[in-house]
Image (cartoon, rainbow, N blue to C red):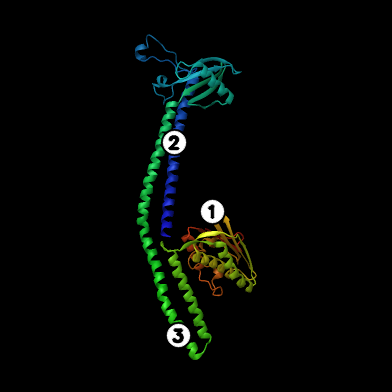
Amino acid sequence: MIKKLQTRFIFISMLSMILVLTIIMTSVNYLNYQRVVKNADHTLQYLSENSGHFPQFPQNQEKERQRWSPPEPKNPKPWNMSPEAPYETRYFSVLLTEDGSLVSTDTRKIAAVDDTAASDYAAQIIASKKTSGFLSCYRYLVKTSADGIHIIFLDCSRNLDTFRSFLLTSILVSLLGLCSVLGLVFFFSRIVMKPVSESYEKQRRFITDAGHELKTPVTIINANREIMEIEFGENEWTQGIQKQTQRLTDLTSQLIYLSRMEEADNHLLKIDFCISDLVEESVQSFQALAAAQNKSFFSHITPFLSYWGDESSIRRLISLLLDNAIKYSPPQGCIEVTLRKRGKNIILMVYNTTEQISCENLPYLFDRFYRTDKSRNSETGGYGIGLSIARAITDAHKGKISAESKDGSSLLITVSL
């Protein structure tokens, strides 16, 4: 149980860390990508407003002002554009007529693309009917003017490579960080769980010791009762003593068994046996009890199913579930047992009609001494510990047990082994 709690703590911690890192890394890389796209679009817009090229400026306007007066650009340079942008930027453009015929290409500012490749790129853009986007590593912008359709391509390979490198680096750093956090969480979880483990171990040991210590006085009380019956005869008081000592004996035995099953080393003797025959025998023993209480009992058992486990524990598990179904089914109720194979697992389902049961109570049915309010009476003879033992047996066999109620007036317990 403590190991499961520790595993759950580690799982929740790591899941939270993964979610936080995923959100952070996704946001950072998304913003980084959007920055690449935004800068490319600004450059393309600037090129489209200046006939597909950067305006020419002299290197030193102060010295050249008297000798050469450059033409003013149609639009001012964006404030965030580097002065080196005209020399660093690789781009090309294609001019088409309105019907898509090629007029001219300009590939002077790029070496990786020739005129034929530029016209092919333009044809793909026209076929896609998009005005902007990415084609390979080129960001493009389509602008229609009186001269025709002007398509400008901007080489973003360097920026995209930087983006991919940052993305890969962030993923690797995140994975290394998660591995480090996993080690730290595992280390500190053992420290955090140590007081809980010690407390749980003391509680389990107390239950075991108390159970063994109670056996002696119960045995003495029962022996004295028998002597009283021999000397004075049986009466209602001796019958009451017998009934209560028997209940106390059963309760202590179940507590000791539950404590033993929850131990890490429970010394289960696992063998290969026919679980179908085991369920069939248990069903036959409970059918007479159900008939005596006017309750319907049905079974659907797949024959010749074998299972590798502790036979006595599985027998006890089946008996506990059937006993619980009969005890808590109302008069004229219905009990149904199903055993079948699902994939590699063996599924045991015990269904019974019951009084009104709230879905909020279902998660607590397997807790120790838990019973619904309507079941807290001595007529059923239950202690609220039977399903706890059933879960302990299932956990000891690495199985799963669950309870569900679809209509609020029936209970289905499913065991997967």
Residue 83, position in %: x, y? Answer: 39, 21
What amino acid is found at the position of numbered circle 1 in the picture?
A: Lys
Q: Which mark is residue 29?
A: 2
Mark 3 / mark 1, whichever is N-terminal = 3
State yes or no: discs 3 and 1 in contact (Cβ < 8 Å). no
If the image is split into quadrants, where does the N terminus sit?
bottom left
What amino acid is found at the position of numbered circle 3 in the picture?
A: Asn
Q: Dot 3, how many residues are within 10 Å of its Cα: few (below 14), some (14-19), or many (20+)?
A: some
Of 195 and 50, nearer the camera is 195
Decide: is 254 above or below 229.
above
Mark 1 / mark 2, whichever is N-terminal = 2
State whether residue 75 appears in this view.
no
- Residue drawn at the location 45% of the way across and 42% of the way down: 23
Q: Which mark is residue 5?
A: none
Q: Dot 1, how many residues are within 10 Å of its Cα: few (below 14), some (14-19), or many (20+)?
A: few
Residue 243, position in %: x, y? Answer: 51, 79
Q: Secondary structure at mark 2?
A: helix
Q: Distance of mark 2 from mark 3, alpha carbons?
A: 81 Å
In the picture, residue 71 is in which quadrant?
top left
Nearer the observer: mark 3 or 1; the answer is 1
What amino acid is found at the position of numbered circle 2 in the picture?
A: Asn
Residue 145, position in %: x, y? Answer: 56, 18
- Residue drawn at the location 41% of the way across and 39% of the way down: 171
Q: Distance of mark 1 from mark 2, alpha carbons?
A: 43 Å
Residue at the spot of label 3: 224
Q: Secondary structure at mark 3?
A: helix
Q: Residue furthest top?
A: 67
Nearer the observer: mark 1 or 2; the answer is 1
**Residue 403 in the figure: left or right of residue 11:** right
Q: Which mark is residue 344?
A: 1
Decide: is 336 above or below 218.
above
Q: Secondary structure at mark 1?
A: loop
